[in-house]
Amino acid sequence: MKLENDTIRLRAVEPLDIDLLYLWENDPKVWTVSESVTPYSRFELEKYILSEGDIFANRQLRLMIDCKQNCDYLTVGTVDLFDFNPIHGRAGLGIMIYSSENRSKGYASKAMDILIEYAFTVLNISVLYCNISVNNHISINCFEKAGFERCGLKKSWNLTPNGREDEIMLQLIK
């Protein structure tokens, strides 16, 4: 199965991605959705890249989102399967389009469509889930457009600079 469509390609993380990952993982604006609060060293990211690959061993998979532009590709973000449980056939799904100039162009939706098909057909996952802040309306809409349904609310779940926020849990069942 090719992990691509007419405008988006999902691919494995490569050592050449180190500069992008270093920038993205160390941006405090991203930490609010990634539950990270500390920067990553280049060394830590290099180890991660070299160990990445086998979702059954690592219980997670990160793919780079490449957007077709003319005859070349531009890497615009990442999509992750995490908390993978092959026995119960479930995994969390997370997506990030880093630059605001690349958002609201449908890249996340198209990448998610590709990953959902891969998860359901190749990995035999039956349930995908995600957790999104109630104030992240764009992400909620993106996941609901992909067929995810709200299934829970975690009250006062995350601490933000503006105080505590609720978090919505959404699921997509095959």
Image (cartoon, rainbow, N blue to C red):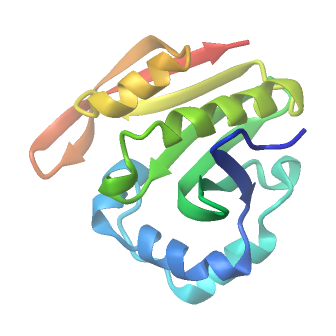
For this view, does 121 lie left or right of residue 33? right
Q: Give the image quarter of residue 139.
A: top left
Residue 24 vertical position relative to residue 77 in the rendered view, above or below: below
Mark yes or no: residue 61 visible: no
Q: Can you name the residue that lies furthest to the left here?
A: 162
Name the residue nearer the viewer: 154 or 16.
16
The image shows residue 23 at horizontal and vertical percentages of: 43, 76
Residue 62 vertical position relative to residue 172 in the rendered view, above or below: below
For this view, does 149 lie left or right of residue 70? left
Q: Give the image quarter of residue 157.
A: top left
Quarter of the picture containing the C terminus is top right
For this view, does 17 lie left or right of residue 145? right
The image shows residue 51 at horizontal and vertical percentages of: 79, 71
Name the residue nearer the viewer: 42 or 110.
110
Residue 107 vertical position relative to residue 127 in the rendered view, above or below: below
The image shows residue 55 at horizontal and vertical percentages of: 82, 49
The image shows residue 104 at horizontal and vertical percentages of: 36, 39
Quarter of the picture containing the N terminus is top right
Mark yes or no: residue 19 visible: yes
Image point (37%, 25%), residue name? 140
Q: Can you name the residue that lies furthest to the bottom here?
A: 43
For this view, does 98 lie left or right of residue 174? left
Count up the numbered dots: 0
Q: Give the image quarter of residue 156.
A: top left
Image point (61%, 88%), residue name? 43
Residue 32 vertical position relative to residue 166 in the rendered view, above or below: below
